[in-house]
C-alpha cells in the first residue's frame, strides 16, 4: 500500500464560487434565436419521485392499498442529490440512524437502525439477503424500497424494525446511453455510465459501471477508491417468457476513518478537570497510520426467469450466488493521557499544563471477514375468485445457504503502539498489526415456504393476510469447538384496508418477526450469558400499525400517516461495554410513534419528498435502563425541486433530535465522555442547467450553514465520525 498522504482541507468560500462559475457558463452566453414551427405536444406529467407499486412480487397491490409503511427512494432523487452511497440515499427516509460500533471497535460496512432496531443484516437485493461488511454504492440501483415494521413474514429471520430492498437496473426495450462525471471539494472524482442496447425485438443488454477516487470533505488522509461493473442481458422481452442474467462486481481500496476524539464537543464530560476543559480537536485530525487499509471485494451472479401463464398468473425463479470479502486494518484514537511513551501507563494526572503536548492512545483493529450466499427462490402470483370475492395471491418457496467466515485477532500490547499528539497527530508512523489467532466459521441452511393473499370483498374492503414458515439449521466451528442449532420460525402478518374513495385508504395491520440466537452472523457461543447461546430464546418483535394513504392532485401527490407500536421481547443487552459476554435480558422494550410522508408533484414543475417520524422507547422489567440507545424522539427529512425551462433548482433539510448513548439513570457522568449525540439541522441546495438536449450540469452544495455535527458515535463515547462541513459537488451528465 502506498504511504502517500493527501490532505483534505476544509472548503473555502471561493471554491464554491469557482464551482458556480464552472457549472453554468452556457447560461451567460447570448445566442441568436431560432424560429421553428409551432408544435403542440400533450403528455401526462411525469412524477419521478412517486412510485405506484413495489417491485417486490410479494406485494401484489399498489402501495396506496398496502397496509404497511413503505417508502421508495427513486433514482431521480438520488441523482439530484448527488447521493452515491446507500447511507447517503437513506437520508431521504426518517427514522434511520447510523452507528459507529461497540466500545472501541468501528463497525464495518453499512451499519444502521430502523425504528430503533439494528438493521444492517436486513438489506436485500431484489428480494435476496445481502450480507457482508461493505459500504454499498447506488450506481446500479433503480430504486430503494424501505419497509418499516417487523417483517419476518416477508424476509424471514430478523427484520425486527423493517428491511431494505434494493432494486437492480435491468435491460429494457429502449436504447439509451447515459453518463455522469463529477468532482467534489473533497477532491473525489467519479464517473458512472448506464448503457442499454437492444439486440433485436426481444433481446437487450445493459451495462452499468462506476469508478471513483478521492478524499472526504473535512478529513485528512481518509481516501476512498472504488471500481464497479454490472453487465446484464435479457431474453424474451415483450413475450410471455423472460430470462434475465446479470452480475455485479465491486472492488474497493480505501483508507478507513477511525473518527476523532470527542473532547471539547457539546456535552462532553471527563472526571479529570483538565481534560474536561480541553478544547475541541481539529475536525481534519487523522489518528490513524500509513499502514491502515480497507480492501473489499464483492461479486454477485443472478439468473431470473419469469413466465406469464395469462389471466394474471406469473411464475418467477431467481437463482443467485454472492460473495463478499473485507480485509481491514484500522487505527483509532482512545483515551487522553500524559504518557510520554506507549509503555507508560495511561495516567491523566501527569497531563502537562500545555495542552499542545497532550497525547491520545491508539488502538489497532482488524477485520477479515467473508460472506457467501447461494439461493434459489420460486414465486407464483395469481388471481382467482371465490364467489364475489377476489384473491391476489403471492406464494413461494426458498432454499438458502449462507456462510460467514471471520478471523479473530489478538491486539498488540499498548507498549508497542505509540500514542499520538491529541491536537497535532502524525500519521506517518508504522504500527504493528493485530495477529490472527483463529477463525470462526458459521453457516446456516434454510428452507422456507410462504403465502400472501390480498382479499377484496368489495371496492371498499380488503383483507391482507400472510404467513411464512422457515426451517433452519445453523452451525458454528471455532477452533475445535463446534455448536449447532436448529428450529422452525413461524411469521405472519394481517391487515385490513377500507377505501372511502378510489384515491384513498384507511388501514390497520399487525405483524411479527423473530431473530434466533446467532442469526445475524451464524456465530453461536456456549457461554451461558452470551447473546448467541443456542439455548437462548429468539428475540421476538410484534408490530401494530394504523394509518391512512391518499393520492391527491390527480394522483400526482401521495400523503401517508401511520401510528405504530413495536414490542420487543427477549432482547439481550450488553451490561459491561468491556465484557463481550455480559449480556442480560432487558425484558420488554416498546417503540412507538407517528410517521408522516408526502411524495410526488405539487405542480407539473414542482416535486417534493418529505417525511417525519417520532419515536418513543421504553423498557419494562429492567431496573437500570428505561429507554434505548440511538432512538431520537424526532427525525425529519425534506427534498424539493422546481423546474423552469432549462433550469432546475432545489434544496433539502434534515433534522435529527438528540440520540442518547447513556440511558442508565445510575450511570456515572464522569465516565460518560459523550452521553449523547446532540440534535442538528442540515440544509442542502442544488441547481442544474440543461446546456443542450443531451448535456446538463448540476451543482450541489451541502451543509449550507457549515453546521458542526456528529454523524455517529462509538458506544464508549470516546470518538465520533462527523457530518460533512460546507462542501460542494459539480456534475456533468450526458445522454444519447
Image (cartoon, helix red, strand yellow):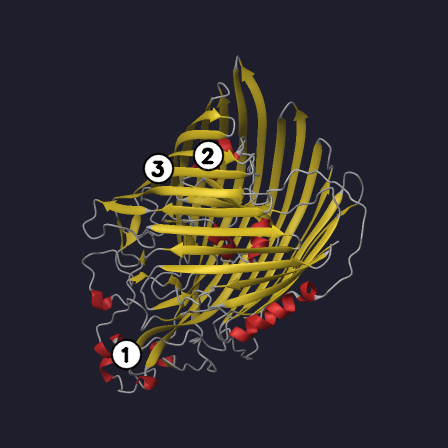
Front-lying residue, 569 or 499: 499
Looking at the rendered structure, the secondary structure element under dot 3 is strand
- The answer to whether marks 2 and 3 mark residues whose Cβ atoms lie closer than 8 Å is no
Give the mark, 2 or 3, whose residue is nearer the N terminus: 3
Q: Which residue is mark 2?
A: 549
Structural distance between the alpha carbons of marks 2 and 1: 58 Å
Instruction: Report, in whole angstroms, how far the alpha carbon at label 3 lies from the one at label 1.
Output: 46 Å
- Please say whether residue 693 is visible from this viewpoint: yes
| Residue placed under numbered mark 1 in the picture | 346
Mark 1 burial class by Cα count in 10 Å: few <14, some 14-19, many 20+: some
Q: Is residue 46 left or right of residue 423?
A: right
Secondary structure under tag 1 reads loop
Q: Residue at x 41, y 81 (%)?
A: 425
Q: Nearer the viewer, mark 2 or mark 3?
A: 2
Residue 235 sits above or below residue 623 on the image:
above
Q: Is residue 668 above or below residue 356?
A: above
Say which element carries label 2.
strand
Alpha-carbon neighbours of circle 2 within 10 Å: few (<14), some, or many (≥20)? many
Spatial distance from mark 2 to mark 3, Cα to Cα? 22 Å
Q: Which residue is mark 3?
A: 542
The answer to whether mark 3 and mark 1 are in CB contact below 8 A is: no
Point out the residue furthest to the top here: 387
Earlier-in-chain disc, 2 versus 1: 1
Q: Please rate how many residues cluster around mark 3, counting C-alpha atoms within 10 Å: few if below 14, some from 14 to 19, many from 20.
A: many
In the rendered view of the protein, which quadrant contains the N terminus? bottom right
Residue 570 image position (x, y, % from top left) = 29, 43
Which of pointers 3 and 1 lies earlier in the amino acid sequence? 1
Residue 524 shows up from this direction: no
Amino acid at each position: 500500500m502506498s504511504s502517500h498522504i493527501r490532505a483534505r482541507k476544509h472548503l473555502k468560500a471561493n471554491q464554491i464560487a469557482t464551482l458556480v462559475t464552472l457549472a453554468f457558463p452556457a447560461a451567460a452566453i447570448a445566442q441568436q434565436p431560432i424560429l421553428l414551427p409551432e408544435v403542440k405536444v400533450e403528455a401526462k406529467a411525469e412524477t419521478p419521485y412517486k412510485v405506484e407499486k413495489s417491485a417486490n412480487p410479494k406485494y401484489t397491490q399498489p402501495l396506496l392499498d398496502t397496509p404497511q409503511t413503505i417508502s421508495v427512494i427513486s433514482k431521480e432523487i438520488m441523482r439530484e442529490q448527488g447521493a452515491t452511497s446507500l447511507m447517503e440515499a437513506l437520508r431521504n427516509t426518517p427514522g434511520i440512524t447510523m452507528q459507529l460500533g461497540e466500545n472501541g471497535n468501528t463497525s464495518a460496512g453499512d451499519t444502521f437502525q430502523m425504528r430503533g432496531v439494528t438493521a444492517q443484516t436486513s438489506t436485500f437485493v431484489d428480494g435476496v439477503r445481502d450480507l457482508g461488511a461493505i459500504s454499498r454504492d447506488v450506481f446500479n440501483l433503480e430504486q430503494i424500497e424501505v419497509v418499516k415494521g417487523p417483517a419476518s413474514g416477508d424476509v424471514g429471520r430478523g427484520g425486527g424494525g423493517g428491511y431494505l430492498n434494493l432494486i437492480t437496473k435491468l435491460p429494457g426495450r429502449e436504447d439509451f446511453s447515459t453518463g455522469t462525471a463529477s468532482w467534489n471539494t473533497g477532491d473525489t472524482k467519479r464517473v458512472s455510465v448506464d448503457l442499454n442496447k437492444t439486440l433485436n425485438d426481444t433481446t437487450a443488454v445493459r451495462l452499468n459501471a462506476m469508478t471513483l477516487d478521492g478524499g472526504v470533505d473535512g478529513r485528512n488522509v481518509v481516501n476512498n477508491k472504488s471500481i464497479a461493473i454490472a453487465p446484464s442481458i435479457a431474453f424474451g422481452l415483450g413475450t410471455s417468457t423472460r430470462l434475465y442474467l446479470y452480475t455485479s462486481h465491486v472492488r474497493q481500496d480505501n483508507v478507513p476513518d477511525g473518527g476523532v476524539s470527542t473532547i471539547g464537543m457539546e456535552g462532553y464530560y471527563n472526571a479529570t478537570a483538565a481534560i474536561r476543559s480541553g478544547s475541541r480537536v481539529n475536525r481534519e485530525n487523522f489518528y490513524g497510520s500509513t499502514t491502515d487499509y480497507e480492501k473489499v471485494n464483492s461479486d454477485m451472479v443472478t439468473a431470473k426467469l419469469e413466465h406469464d401463464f395469462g389471466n394474471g398468473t406469473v411464475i418467477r425463479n431467481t437463482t443467485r450466488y454472492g460473495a463478499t470479502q473485507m480485509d481491514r486494518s484500522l487505527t483509532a484514537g482512545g483515551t487522553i493521557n500524559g504518557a510520554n511513551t506507549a509503555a507508560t501507563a495511561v495516567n491523566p494526572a501527569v497531563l502537562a499544563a500545555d495542552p499542545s503536548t497532550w497525547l491520545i492512545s491508539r488502538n489497532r483493529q482488524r477485520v477479515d471477514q467473508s460472506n457467501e450466499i447461494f439461493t434459489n427462490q420460486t414465486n407464483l402470483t395469481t388471481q382467482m375468485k371465490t364467489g364475489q370475492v377476489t384473491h391476489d395471491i403471492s406464494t413461494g418457496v426458498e432454499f438458502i445457504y449462507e456462510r460467514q467466515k471471520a478471523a479473530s485477532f489478538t491486539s498488540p500490547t499498548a507498549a508497542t503502539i505509540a500514542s499520538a499528539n491529541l491536537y497535532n497527530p502524525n500519521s506517518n508512523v508504522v504500527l504493528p498489526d493485530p495477529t490472527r489467532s483463529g477463525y470462526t466459521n458459521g453457516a446456516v441452511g434454510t428452507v422456507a415456504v410462504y403465502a400472501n393473499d390480498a382479499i377484496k370483498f368489495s371496492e371498499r374492503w380488503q383483507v391482507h393476510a400472510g404467513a411464512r414458515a422457515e426451517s433452519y439449521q445453523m452451525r458454528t466451528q471455532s477452533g475445535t469447538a463446534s455448536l449447532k442449532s436448529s428450529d422452525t420460525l413461524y411469521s405472519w402478518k394481517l391487515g385490513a384496508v377500507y377505501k372511502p374513495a378510489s384515491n384513498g385508504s384507511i388501514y390497520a395491520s399487525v405483524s411479527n418477526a423473530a431473530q434466533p440466537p446467532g442469526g445475524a452472523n451464524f456465530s453461536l457461543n456456549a457461554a451461558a450469558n452470551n447473546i448467541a447461546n443456542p439455548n437462548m430464546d429468539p428475540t421476538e418483535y410484534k408490530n401494530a400499525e394504523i394509518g391512512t394513504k391518499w393520492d391527491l392532485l390527480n394522483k400526482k401527490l401521495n400523503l401517508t400517516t401511520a401510528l405504530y407500536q413495536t414490542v420487543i421481547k427477549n432482547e439481550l443487552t450488553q451490561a459491561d461495554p468491556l465484557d463481550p459476554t455480559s449480556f442480560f435480558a432487558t425484558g420488554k422494550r416498546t417503540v412507538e410513534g407517528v410517521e408522516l410522508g408526502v411524495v410526488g408533484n405539487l405542480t407539473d414543475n414542482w416535486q417534493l419528498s418529505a417525511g417525519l417520524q417520532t419515536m418513543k422507547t421504553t423498557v419494562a422489567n429492567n431496573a437500570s435502563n428505561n429507554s434505548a440507545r440511538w432512538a431520537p424522539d424526532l427525525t425529519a427529512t425534506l427534498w424539493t425541486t422546481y423546474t423552469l425551462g432549462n433550469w432546475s433548482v432545489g434544496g433539502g433539510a434534515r433534522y435529527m433530535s438528540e440520540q442518547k448513548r447513556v440511558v442508565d439513570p445510575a450511570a456515572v457522568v464522569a465516565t460518560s465522555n459523550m452521553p449523547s449525540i446532540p440534535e442538528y439541522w442540515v440544509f442542502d441546495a442544488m441547481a442544474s442547467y440543461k446546456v443542450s438536449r443531451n448535456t446538463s450540469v448540476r451543482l450541489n452544495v451541502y451543509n449550507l450553514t457549515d453546521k458542526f455535527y456528529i454523524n455517529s458515535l462509538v458506544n464508549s463515547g470516546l470518538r465520533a465520525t462527523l457530518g460533512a462541513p460546507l462542501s460542494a459537488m459539480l456534475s456533468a451528465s450526458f445522454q444519447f
